[in-house]
Amino acid sequence: MRVMAQMSMIMNLDKCIGCHTCSVTCKQVWTNRTGVEYVWFNNVETRPGLGYPKRYEDQEKWNGGWVRNKRGRLKLRSGGRLKRLATIFNNPDLPVIDDYYEPWTYDYDMLTKAPLSTESPVARPKSLLTGKNMDIKWSGNWDDNLGGSQETAADDPILATMSEHVKMEFENTFMFYLPRICEHCLNPACVAACPSGAMYKREEDGIVLVDEDACRGWRMCVSACPYKKVYFNHKTGKAEKCTLCYPLIEQGKPTICSETCVGRLRYLGLMLYDADAVLAAAAIENDQDLLEAQRGVFLDPFDPEVIAAAKAEGIEDDWILAAQNSPIYKLISEYKVALPLHPEYRTMPMVWYIPPLSPVVDVISTTNNDGEDARTLFAAIDKLRIPVEYLAGLFSAGDVVPVESSLRKLAAMRSYMRDINLGKDRDESIPAAVGMTGTEIEAMYRLLAIAKYEDRYVIPKAHVETARELEELACSLDTDGGTRHGRSDLDRGTLWQDSGNAVQRHRRQLQRDDRQRRREDQTDNAWPDQPPELERRWPTGRLVPAGS
Amino acid sequence: MNPIDFLLWVAFPYAAMAVFVVGHIFRYRHDQFGWTSRSSQVYENRLLRWGSPMFHYGILMVLGGHVVGLLVPKEWLEFVGVSNEIYHVGATWLGSIAAVLTLAGLAILIYRRRLNTRVLLATTVMDKVMYALLGATLLFGTTATVLFQVLGAGYDYRGTISPWVRGLLSAQPDPALMANVPFFFQLHVLSATLLFLLWPFTRLVHVFSAPIGYFVRPYIVYRSRDTHRGSGARKARRGWEKSVLPTSARDKDAARR
């Protein structure tokens, strides 16, 4: 047994209102730069829908993730080491930027600078890649709230596996939001596919990162990730991905997407797992057994044997305590309501989801039945095959049993807690029907519904005794040139500047103006210091000693 | 010794070699972040799918041919049974195939780079210089081969250019060997030398990061946080400088008070 700690996330989909605040704040912090305009480390998809990039779940096309070969061993779906290097000159599985979307801005200048005319001026969309006028045809969430889904939703790879009547009916039946970040997998395909060895999983907390200095831009990580959560910065020529906001996590603070989540639906905490058991679990034969196999890799942080082994691996006491208090452990292993996204990709993802009960409740409510009555809810979960099968396609490789079990627990919680809130007697038969006790249901309710900050985020600080003091977001991200904007003399020269386009030229001019202003500001502000060593005479005529 | 010959066939190559070596070391130490193939595949893939593998596999064949032709002495090949005639036929045929692949690939790549706006705008000045030199070197080399080896009687560069190259590498340069080499071969050598001189400052550095280590490393890489943070006690590496708010002198003054 080799105990490792993994910082993990769970999202409670029932609470997601699809406001995209997580995406926007993430973008402001991490991808608000040239080269990654089209990149959303965090995105929110409406399901059913195509997702971002388009149809990323269609692994027949993109060849992401792992497969089990005939000898029962894991192999990257895109091929082994030899094939990877043989295709290094042209990655056969790489999405082009149009599979995400062509990034654009608007010609805002037109609005203020257009000459007087009878027509109102229009800010036309301009491509950020070519500077030319463009028609916007797709974006990161173009089918938001099922918009235009009559045209597109039939291409949803999950729907495609379901029967015809489902495809026809889904729109009247259900809709929910799926926020996605990097899964920080236990068996990451992107890391395995990186020819340069630039991607790695951190020993301390399992966060998967790209070493920007070692990355040589071969793009194999982009295509190997079945979730398409590694991106290519087309300006710097390097891979970038969600960092799980490690500079914050290391200080015991939640990620930006979690912190700013309006619905408070994200949970962060540790999972202890047996690193030696990962490969065998990921290589299990039947896709539908992968969920249970992954649960089997997790270790009980209260087990004295596990604690001893964790300490032997150098995991500190406060981290073990954090693992014991982890909301992730409770939701995955104790209540078993959280499920992984696409376990069949065999990457052992570590961002899990509590499937949404709301599609079921919505249907019940529209039929004027009691959407909080346990028996009605249980019956509906059994009967409403469409949402359940669809959710199973996302969270359990098509096996409806775990999804049903999770939904039934949520339904039980809903109706058990209603009785309490209305001052009625507790109906202990409700928790019993889902194999829980009333106390457990109440604890789960506190975690899921009350969701206090300190219950949602149990994040132990990184240990710095042996290292340096941690700094909050030590690198500035607000300029061109990747997460690493510091400029050496090498790329300050014009030789390394690309030819650019109207938009970029405009932006550069703005930057020049900005610098000029800043210089002027500094000159303006310089007066109190001059001359610093001499006495200054203030307008009142009073003598002010230097340095006061 | 003719001073021009000395300049062209001794001084210039050694200068290029020095810049090549020192430039690579310098860039490797100071510009890891800029060390990339700078792929443009995400912009356009329909043409690149053909052009890039054709060019790269072609140029690898060209490289192999040059290693055999320039670095392996004629006598050694004869010793293992490769006679002049066999060598000539092999070099001309394989060389032609490689040249066709490489040139066609490069033509597709340049066409794409010029006519696809996305790719064009991502092209740096250095890229353009590099393309020009690379194209010129390939064209001169192909012209020389076609004129002398395919159409002509065959020029025995293994008696002149090859010993000259080996002489350069073994610090016994002999410019006289190059003095009477046909013009197109001379041009080919000179533009190649210039290309080597600029090499460390172009995206061609990606040649030296060919990921051979991928064959032997474990699939999943683990790394400790502490060994890989570039801030604090250690000198900050490029790109990891701390962000400092610009402070006006007045604020500084206020802070002092």
Image: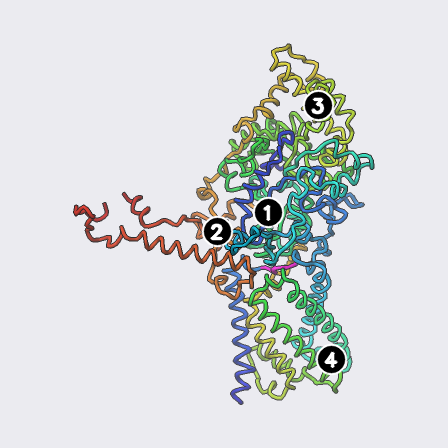
Instruction: Kindly report the distance in space between the C-alpha atoms of the residues bearing marks 4 and 1.
Output: 55 Å
Residue in the foreground of this view, choosing between A275 and B119: B119
Q: Which residue is mark 2?
A: B240
Q: Which residues are magenta?
A: B36-40
Q: How many C-alpha atoms fall within 10 Å of the one at disc 3: few (<14), some, or many (≥20)?
A: few
Q: Nearer the viewer, mark 3 or mark 4?
A: 3
The label on residue B78 is 4
The label on residue A241 is 1
* Same chain? Circles 3 and 2: no
| Magenta stretch, overall SS | loop
Q: Residue at x 54, y 41 (%)?
A: A25
Q: Residue furthest top?
A: A425
Instruction: Kindly report the distance in space between the C-alpha atoms of the residues bearing marks 3 and 4.
Output: 90 Å
Instruction: Kindly report the distance in space between the C-alpha atoms of the residues bearing marks 1 and 3.
Output: 41 Å
Residue in the foreground of this view, choosing between A426 and B225: A426
Residue in the foreground of this view, choosing between B17 and A280: B17
Please state which amino acid type lies under the numbered disc 3: Ser
Q: How many C-alpha atoms fall within 10 Å of the one at disc 1: few (<14), some, or many (≥20)?
A: many
